[in-house]
Image: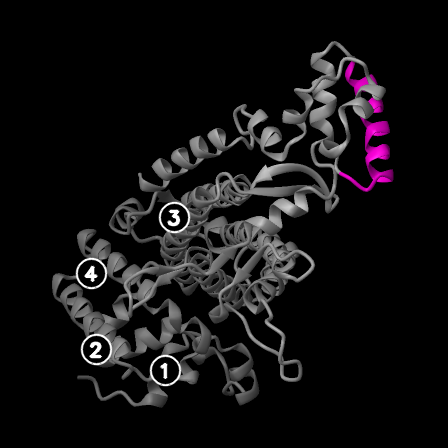
Amino acid sequence: MSSVSDNQLANKAQAWSALFSEPMSELVKRYTASVFFDKRLWKADIQGSLAHAEMLNAQGILSAEDHAAIQRGMAQISGEIEAGQFEWKLDLEDVHLNIEARLTELVGIAGKRLHTGRSRNDQVATDVRLWLRDEIDELSLLLRALQSALVEVAEKNAEVILPGFTHLQVAQPVAFGHHLLAYVEMFARDAERLADARRRVNRLPLGAAALAGTSYPLDRERVARTLTMEGVCQNSLDAVSDRDFAIEFTAAASLVMVHISRLSEELILWMSQSFGFIDIADRFCTGSSIMPQKKNPDVPELARGKTGRVVGHLMGLITLMKGQPLAYNKDNQEDKEPLFDTVDTLKDTLRIFAEMVGGQPNPATGNKEGGITVNATAMEQAALKGYATATDLADYLVKKGLPFRDAHETVAHAVKAATTHACDLSELPLAVLQGFHPQIEKDVYECLSLRGSLNARNTLGGTAPAQVRAQIARHQARLAA
């Protein structure tokens, strides 16, 4: 083992130290250090370093002995970090220099040879991509779990009638299951966006060195294959300075959170006494410090708020990059905290929503306890309040030969009459309805019922229970694949 002191290691880790006549001030050291947040990249850093070392050995740049020593040293470092025994040092600035310094301490000169043909510029870009690739894979599974939970609730409520709204006014009746499947479609698109972004994340910058490439005969494609990356960044300047992949991921994450926020807003409204459509399990709610009757939907409220946090990170990353000249600049150190927080926020939100929507097993009974209880009666009663079947009456008249615009006007008069009499369209006597148009017959009442309206919309993508069940089957097959 080398007897190099900590101060010597810190000094030697700074490749520019011989050029400078005074040490970095403690304030600047703290201001510029990233080790206490970028240390989460340690697995990716070691993974990238091992692939780089393997390639250097294959190319005859690194001896077999040095390669073996690096592998041995990295294995020990991994064990120390996992055991919480690794000492992260502020003097060593970041995750890369901390690991390299410890490697050199463990294996001596072989550790110093590891950095041949690379720079921290391409090293950090590689580490972030490797880390983000794995996080996207985990997020994709969480998105799948949330979709499955929504499909499960939709299946139980394929025939429950909910007032569909436009402008937050009662518009037409829809199946509650159909409504939930709209969010499944949103989250399915989110999963597609993440998968597509992953392809661009999963490209290798390593070997671009500081900005211009290297004079060593590197085999970058070999490293990409070792790391199961889909390609190599083709321009060295772009390779080290590009953060499009982080922005693109954060944009996709922002859309996921926007969809979560829309669902949250509806859950909050539905749970309020003014709606009373659902109840959220106590374990996802809190009470009031002063009002003992209160049960607050804190989880969806907080998720709605955290959406602004993630969208703010997207704006921050775009602003970070907008004025940077090529190639790498220290500004890019500021990409990590918003990216890390975006991933953490999204993972936590998806986990808790999948559990809140789908429920969880009760250890005592073994039964699955749902997080959301549906009040089907309250939903159906609300659908009766806004003349939700008015369009159905217009369609009925069109089928009798009336032009739609004329039918629209006729129904408007019928709604006005129902409003005057404080009743639903279906409660108007047949004689009154025939006064608006003589071709209205007794069969009109089937069209004016909520159930008849629902069943009539039996086209692809419609809200008829038969269509809802067909969509549920499609999603179940897709999610099981």
What whole-number distance in Å separates the C-alpha atoms at marks 2 and 4? 14 Å
The picture quadrant where one finds residue 385 is: top right
Is label 1 or label 2 in front? 1
The answer to whether the residue labelled 1 contacts the one labelled 4, judged by CB atoms less than 8 Å apart, is no
Left or right? Give the position of 336 relative to 266. Answer: left
**Where does label 3 land, which residue?**
202
Looking at the picture, which amino acid does disc 3 mark? Asn
| Amino acid type, label 1 | Trp
Q: Amino acid at mark 4?
A: Leu
Question: Distance from label 1 to label 4 (Cα)?
Answer: 28 Å
Query: Which of pointers 2 and 3 indicates the residue nearer the eye?
Result: 3
Along the line of sight, which residue is nearer the eye, 209 or 450?
450
Q: In front: mark 3 or mark 4?
A: 3
Choose the circle earlier in sequence order: 3 or 1.
1
Graded by Cα atoms within 10 Å as few (under 14), some (14 to 19) or many (20 or more), the crowding at tag 2 reads: many
Q: Which mark is residue 31?
A: none
Q: Is residue 246 visible?
A: yes
Q: CA distance from mark 3 to mark 1?
A: 28 Å
Which mark sits nearer the N-terminus, 3 or 4? 4
CB under 8 Å between discs 3 and 4: no
Name the foreground residue: 480 vs 22: 480
**Secondary element type, mark 4:** loop
Q: Counting residues from the N terminus, which is met first, the one under dot 1 or under dot 4? A: 4
The residue beneath circle 4 is 62
- Report the residue marked by disc 2: 108
Residue in view at x 55 percent, y 28 percent: 455
Quarter of the figure with the C terminus: top left
* Residue 26, position as x, y percentages in the image: 53, 89
